[in-house]
Amino acid sequence: MVASLVTLLVFVAAVIMELAALAFAPAAAGAANTSLMAYVVNNRSDSVTPINLPTNTPGTPITVGDNPVGIAIIPSGKTAYITNAPPLRPGSVTPIDLATKTPDTPINVGVQPIEIAITPDSTTAYVTDFGSGSVTPIDLATNTPGPLITVGNDPFGVAITPDGKTAYVTNQGSHSVTPITVATNTPGTPITVGSSPQGIAITPDGTTAYVANEGSNSVTPISLATNTPGSPITVGAQPHGIAITPDGTTAYVTNVGDNSVTPISLATNTPGTPIPVGNTPAWIAIPPDGATAYVTNAFSDSVTPIITATNTPGPPITVGSSPQGIAITPPAPPPTPTPVSTSTQLSVNPPSPVAAGIMETLTATITPATAAGSLQFSEASFIGFPLLIGNPVTVANGSASITTTLAPGTHSLTAVFTPTDPAAFDSSTSDPLTYVVNAPTQTPSPPTPPVPGGLPPELFQQLIAWLLGQLHLPTF
């Protein structure tokens, strides 16, 4: 089996650390930019270096465990998880709060953990345990490791499909890839690939995985619908890490044996001209905009940015000793839009006061006139709840009207605007408008003519009724 220089670094890191004369002098931190950061794992410095990507400026290293190798960041961008791989001993994973750059309590995993991947829903991390022939799942809600999942020999790389259903693990010693069903943590039938597979990446559409075969100088595409390997793609010497652009058009493969990166056009699976980078390029990551690929150079203690539009390498960025894994924060969520304020003005025609029985037209005007929504007219009541006047009326060109006949009395009228899209416009209520409807004028009844004899009319009628009652005649 062809051994990778980078892999050997992981195995004998403790010895190399004592013999190495390489010193680490971190550069001054640049201006804070939490929206786009890269985090680089420094294997021989036991640290992680943050890099401000808009300026490519390294920041203050964050101390983690012994011989860190891999890194993954949860989709929210709040926490990074780093694998710590002391030689031939059980390892751990260190969570880092990226808001404060503070490491948390390490999580115990298998022997020599290498790479780590996180499900899209942020519930589970999967860690390849190179020395255990296993994968450790971690419940990220509690940072608790679960039972080890047995895979092939020397598991190295891991990637998870965009739908979060399957994790794919490269087995360096078995020359295969093991699919793991995430729902049950059950390993499936291994997929044969090239010699000594290392890194693995999956296309954004979830259709294909690409595996870097260090011992075959090739990349194997795997159709994930059937888990069938395709024809190998020849790349540089000892391919190790691989990343795919967010648009799914290009894969970039690090070649540790010839200090280059090979771009592959995924439409045709055709390799392009190798791009020279630093000494022993190991891992690679691409930010959400796809404009730049960042390559860790293990023996140059640097990171090389590559402009993907031209495949041109830029000036290297100095980091810690023996940089390995690299991860980039996900895109910042778009800012929450601020709803536009609205105002509502109410008018009534004809103007107050009016006589009873007159039809009134209530009109509400909304500013701005572009605000879409509806208006509900109402009036105050003595019971404390508004009395609705008709049904809601759709706003058209900034206004809405309703015609009604108000009862006699003094009315306190309002109009309430409710937007169709509360994220776009605020609701608003008009000032109360007092409106008076006068009661109808009462016409006085003509006086009752006097009854003969000068008796009051009421007494006269009562007397007649009594007399009729005495005669047993019907009353009238």
Image (tube, rainbow, N blue to C red):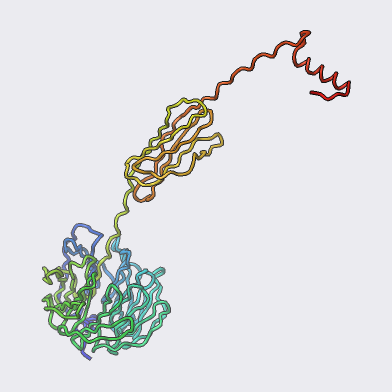
Q: State the image quarter where residue 133 is shown.
A: bottom left
User: Most extreme residue toward the top, as rendered?
Assistant: 453
Which quarter of the figure is the N terminus placed in? bottom left
Residue at 18 percent across and 86 percent down: it is 217
- The residue located at (49%, 39%) in the rendering is 389
Q: Compared with residue 64, is residue 195 higher up or lower down, i.e. above or below? A: below
For the C terminus, give its image quadrant: top right
Residue 18, quarter of the rendered image = bottom left
Residue 370 on image: x %, y %: 32, 45
Above or below, 339 against 26 in this view is above
Task: Compare residues 282 and 343 and report the one nearer the observer.
Answer: 343
Task: Judge by depth and name the residue closer to the eye, 198 or 160.
Answer: 160
Q: Residue at x 39, y 80 (%)?
A: 181
Q: Residue at x 15, y 72 (%)?
A: 302
Total marks placed: 0
> Residue 74 appears in which quarter of the rendering?
bottom left
Extreme residue toward the right, this view: 471
Apparent side of residue 53 relative to residue 391 in the rendered image (left or right): left
**Is residue 81 visible in this depiction of the protein?**
yes
